[in-house]
Image (spheres, rainbow, N blue to C red):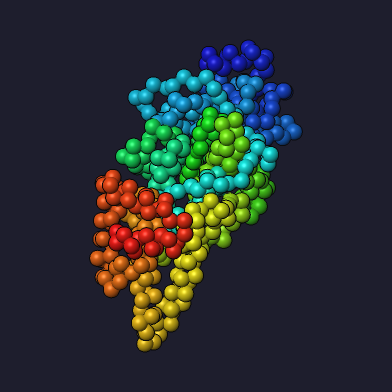
Amino acid sequence: MNEEFAEYLNATGEVGYVQRVISSLAYVDGLPTIKPYERVLFENGASGYVNSFSEDLIETISFSELPIPAGTRVARTGQVLTIPVGEELLGTLIDPLGRSLRSDANQPILAAERPVDNDPLPIRARARISEPCITGITVTDIMVPLGKGQRVLVIGDQKTGKTSFLLRTIISQIREGSVGIYVTVGKSKLVTREIEDALKAAGVFDRTVVMAAYAEDPAGLISIAPSAGMSIAEYFREAGNDVIIVIDDLSMHAKMYRELALLGRRAPGRNSYPGDMFYVHARLMERAGNFLTPYGERSITCIPVIEAPQGDITGYIATNAISMTDGHIFFDYNLFVEGRRPSINPFLSVTRVGRQTQHPVAKEINQLLTSFLSSARQLETVTSFGAELSNQIKDTLEKQQQIYILFNQFAHEIIPLPLQLYLFARIWNGAWKGREEEKVSSELHAIINRYAAEAGFRKIIETVFSASPTLQALLKQVQDRKL
């Protein structure tokens, strides 16, 4: 008999027996005082938790890779499902139960534990989102700005650059002092390893927790991964840190939750998802935000991911997630095919609270570009009919093209906000007027590399940025200095 099982069996004096098994679901008879979401132990050493009750049986979800044999004894633990938390988790790769996924790693001994499923904090514990969340990606920081504590959905087709965007965002925020948590839901081991390697290459892995629920893991383990990741985020928030958490992706989580619901014969709703699918994701999102703590305002910025096959954002899970977040960033497959990197469509993306945190100059540029790019797009439609172009239209289309070149970034590039605004000012002042697109692109990237390499040049750009309260002041500074 398993020692831990025997210990709990003696402590509670209650024993249950598995009567029926369907995949990860084990139906148990007995255990008269068991509670919802309580952790249970099976005689063979596997663990699980209580999912629901019927008149005569208890439905439990096991974390075992193999089905639990019928007749197996079950013991209650008297505790809800928890995950170990602590500073020791930083720089580790763990599963949703907090166990190290490294075969050569010593499992840290963590005294503190938090419930996997917590109630979101009430309104009185929250504060207005006021700090910008800089991603280092120009098109986002200027056109679709984010704030610390915002819940922003990343949505788009497969293989459109979403992971690259997520990694740069989390790296940028960790460099500003936040703690990063990256939760992979139903991804392969190769993808998880690539994410880990990218964080290590950027030098931020020691401020990151990577939680992986692999595609071959049991459905029960995958289904608790987002909540477990959020519990770790709440721990670091209470320890006085700003936190950024990526959940990649919620559509896979929804599929696993649906699988368990259908196996449990719960009534299916739209697209066969259970009726509480919206509640489960909304409750998860509500655990993020900007909060009042003894350390001052501290935030949990949550970036869930949803896959939208063929750009279809009208699916059940996609529309649910859009309605419960503070905006979404749409990765357009057509723009990806055209060669735009990142393939973010600023016209189909929305930020509901980000603009209130945006730098005043960036906000002016946002308003300017929203109208300018919209007008330029209409001009493109006219010119496609072969109309003769005036010099003014030619200049507008050239400036539009150069703006899109500015928005293009290499997969590893993280551009600070002062440099983003400086490069925009150069383009708007006509510094590259009449130049070929390849020449403009190479010079832009040369300036980006120079900013990273030369402290003196970096200081000049930051001085110009801090001395420019308005867009006109920035344009004049850049023009006068001939930078």
Work out which quarter of the rendered image holds the C terminus and state it. Answer: bottom left
Viewer-closest of 194 and 468: 468
Question: Residue 76: x, y in percent?
Answer: 63, 21
The quadrant holding residue 373 is: bottom left
Residue 467 shows in this picture: yes
370 in relation to 409, above or below:
below
- Residue 101 locus on image (x, y percent): 41, 30
Residue 148's spot in the image, x, y percent? 52, 45
Can residue 420 be seen here? The reply is no
Q: Nearer the viewer, residue 324 or 449?
A: 449
The mark tally for this picture is 0
Q: Residue at x 50, y 59 (%)?
A: 363
Q: Nearer the viewer, residue 6 or 309?
A: 309
Does 415 sit left or right of 146 as displayed?
Answer: left
Return the x and y of residue 293 as percentages of the image width and height.
60, 33
- Residue at x 31% of width, y 48% of height: 458
As rendered, which of 254 and 386 lies closer to the eye? 386
Tell me what residue is drawn at x 56 percent, y 20 percent.
Answer: 43
Image vertical order of residue 431 relative to residue 303, above or below: below
With 163 as the anchor, is 120 left or right in this view? right
